[in-house]
């Protein structure tokens, strides 16, 4: 199982695929299909039917490949529906991005051929957000970008795709600071920061007066200045020293950072993911599917991966404790060496 018939590469090995089938892991739905040679059907990895014998199974990168081999889709799990559903979701996302503002659910449903109620359920399962919430999150991203470039708030309102000031200010609390501060490149906001040596390499810590707003192993003052060119960036200082010491201790001694205050903002879905990550005890791990189920969106594994990668404060929000369902480390923004080191340290 090395490539799809359309030329796309398939990164799942047969051993990983079989592990996913035994676990009925929905995170692998869409990555491959399971062909059962004795029955002549192919299924999703999560199919609820009785497991076949391993000797009778062949894995295919797509349903098209399975059909070419003479198999037909399972009537129970309907594997081909997944491809149609994903295509529908992509059309809706494209429509929302093109419109730049909220579209009526009924209008979005017409682009898919599904009923509005079915589209709503489907969109939430795949992305973790309703179409309306996705549109709000997209506007929030555009808002932040527009405010950082615009000369006035009014200019930013319309540049970001809002129909007027009232709609804009309804979403403004997602920014974490006043809109005028974003227009001024963070003017009036004080961020204290430091780059300190740790056993994992150089670590940057930045904090507002509310808590840590950035913790990374690959950034420096330039990253903060690029985001908030007119913010007051203060290196170190007595008010910051105690917090910095707590953060260093949390990195070097797992389990000591649970009470460190953080100051982060994200979409409703991102914040739900980040809260769930903070419930994973040191020394333990969870799969992406586990976290998706925990927050009530078991089908939103891919969206969860994106939220995990958007984590602004490494270690304090322990995204490194999320691994693949087959037990492999998966990815990490700061490299797998750091992720493995953190996990090994926490297991001692």
Image (cartoon, rainbow, N blue to C red):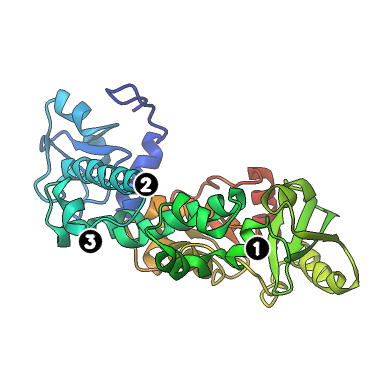
Give coordinates of residue 110: x percent, y percent.
14, 49
Residue wearing tag 1:
181
Q: Earlier in the sequence, mark 2 or mark 3?
A: 2
**Sequence-wise, which precedes: disc 3 or disc 1?**
3
Question: Marks 3/1: CA distance?
Answer: 37 Å
In this rendering, would 136 be left or right of 126?
right
Contact between labelled residues 1 and 3, with CB atoms less than 8 Å apart: no
Q: Which mark is residue 121?
A: 3
Q: Nearer the viewer, residue 1 or 155?
A: 155
Going from the N terminus, do you reach mark 1 or mark 2 first? 2
Q: Residue 304's x, y, as percent? A: 44, 56
- Could you tell me which residue is drawn at 65 percent across and 58 percent down? 314
Q: Answer with the quarter of the image where residue 182 lies.
A: bottom right
From the viewer's perspective, is the residue at label 1 or at label 2 nearer? 1
Which picture quadrant has residue 250?
bottom right
Residue 340 lies, with reference to residue 295, above or below; the image says above
- In 3D space, how far apart are the residues under numbered discs 2 and 3 (Cα atoms)? 28 Å
Question: Front-most of 190 and 216?
Answer: 190
In percent of the image, x 29 and y 31: which residue is there?
Answer: 61
283 lies left or right of 200:
left
Q: SS class of the residue under badge 2?
A: helix
Q: Position of residue 233 (x, y in %)?
A: 80, 59
Q: Does residue 202 appear in this view?
A: yes
């Amino acid at each position: 199982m090395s490539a799809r018939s359309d030329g796309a590469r398939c990164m799942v090995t047969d051993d990983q695929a079989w592990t996913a089938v035994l676990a009925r892991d929905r995170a692998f739905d869409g990555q491959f299909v399971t062909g059962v040679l004795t029955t002549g059907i192919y299924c999703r990895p999560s199919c609820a039917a009785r497991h076949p014998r391993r000797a009778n199974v062949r894995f295919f990168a797509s349903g098209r490949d399975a059909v070419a081999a003479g198999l037909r889709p399972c009537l129970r799990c309907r594997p081909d529906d997944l491809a149609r559903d994903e295509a529908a979701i992509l059309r809706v996302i494209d429509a929302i991005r093109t419109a730049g503002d909220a579209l009526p659910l009924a209008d979005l449903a017409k682009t898919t051929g599904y009923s509005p109620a079915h589209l709503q359920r489907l969109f939430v399962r795949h992305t973790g957000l309703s179409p309306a919430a996705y549109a709000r999150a997209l506007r929030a991203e555009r808002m932040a970008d527009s405010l950082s470039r615009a000369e006035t708030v009014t200019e930013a309102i319309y540049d970001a795709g809002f129909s007027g000031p009232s709609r804009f200010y309804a979403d403004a609390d997602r920014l974490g600071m006043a809109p005028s501060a974003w227009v001024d490149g963070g003017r009036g906001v004080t961020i204290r920061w430091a780059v300190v040596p740790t056993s994992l390499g150089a670590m940057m810590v930045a904090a507002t007066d509310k808590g840590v707003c950035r913790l990374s192993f690959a950034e420096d003052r330039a990253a903060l200045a690029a985001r908030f060119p007119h913010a007051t960036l203060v290196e170190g200082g007595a008010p910051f020293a105690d917090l910095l010491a707590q953060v260093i201790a949390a990195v070097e001694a797992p389990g000591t950072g649970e009470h460190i205050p953080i100051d982060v903002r994200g979409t409703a879905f991102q914040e739900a993911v980040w809260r769930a990550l903070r419930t994973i005890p040191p020394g333990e791990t969870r799969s992406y599917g586990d976290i998706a189920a925990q927050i009530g969106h078991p089908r939103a594994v891919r969206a969860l991966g994106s939220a995990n990668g958007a984590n602004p404060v490494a270690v304090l929000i322990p995204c490194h404790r999320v691994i693949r369902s087959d037990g492999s480390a998966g990815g990490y923004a700061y490299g797998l060496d750091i992720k493995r080191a953190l996990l090994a340290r926490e297991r001692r």
